[in-house]
Image (cartoon, grey):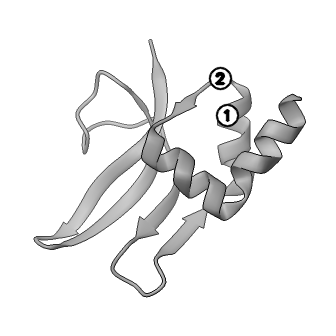
């Protein structure tokens, strides 16, 4: 089972809101997920990124791969740098 950190879309038409979730890559985008680790709202100015740092780092240490978009969000939040410095 390949597990990823990815975005699950919510919100109304033309007003997206995303949850950052841990999910099996075989599941649908907005389908079943293992755990919610944060949220992302691109409609606000500046965009709101809320992450539970301990949960995100715990899953990254277990080997979960983030998608490209989630990796950029982790970099903005500063969590990716903590993960890379811990691994090195």
Q: Are marks 2 and 1 in contact (CB under 8 Å)?
A: yes
- In the picture, measured across the screen, residue 1 lies left or right of residue 30, that is right
Q: Quadrant of residue 75?
A: bottom right
- In the picture, measured across the screen, residue 80 lies left or right of residue 34, that is right
Measuring from the top left, give residue 58's x and y in whole percent: 73, 37
Q: Secondary structure at mark 2?
A: loop
Residue 65's place in the image compared with 79, above or below, is above
Measuring from the top left, give residue 55's x and y in whole percent: 68, 46
Write down the residue under mark 2: 63
Q: Is residue 21 visible?
A: no
Q: Secondary structure at mark 1?
A: helix
Toward the viewer: 49 or 28?
Answer: 49
Toward the viewer: 68 or 26?
Answer: 68
Measuring from the top left, give residue 79's x and y in whole percent: 72, 53
Quadrant, the N terminus: top left
Check disc 2: other Cα within 10 Å, few if <14, some if 14-19, many if 20+. few
Toward the viewer: 25 or 68?
Answer: 68
Residue 29's place in the image compared with 2, above or below, is below
| CA–CA distance in space, label 2 to label 1 | 5 Å
The number of numbered discs placed on residues in the rendered structure image is 2
Write down the residue under mark 1: 60
Q: Which residue appears at 73% of the width and 59% of the height?
A: 78
Q: Which residue appears at 89% of the width and 29% of the height?
A: 88
Q: Which residue appears at 53% of the width and 69% of the height?
A: 49
- In the picture, measured across the screen, residue 1 lies left or right of residue 8, that is right
Check disc 1: other Cα within 10 Å, few if <14, some if 14-19, many if 20+. some
Badge number at residue 70: none
Residue 59's place in the image compared with 10, above or below, is above
């Amino acid at each position: 089972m390949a597990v990823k950190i990815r975005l699950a879309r919510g919100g109304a038409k033309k007003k997206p809101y995303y949850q950052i979730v841990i999910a099996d890559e075989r599941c649908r985008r907005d389908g079943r997920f293992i755990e919610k680790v944060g949220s992302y709202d691109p409609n606000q100015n500046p965009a709101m990124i809320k992450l539970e740092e301990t949960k995100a780092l715990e899953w990254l240490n277990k080997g979960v791969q983030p998608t490209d978009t989630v990796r950029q969000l982790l970099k903005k939040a500063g969590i990716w740098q903590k993960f890379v410095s811990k691994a090195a």
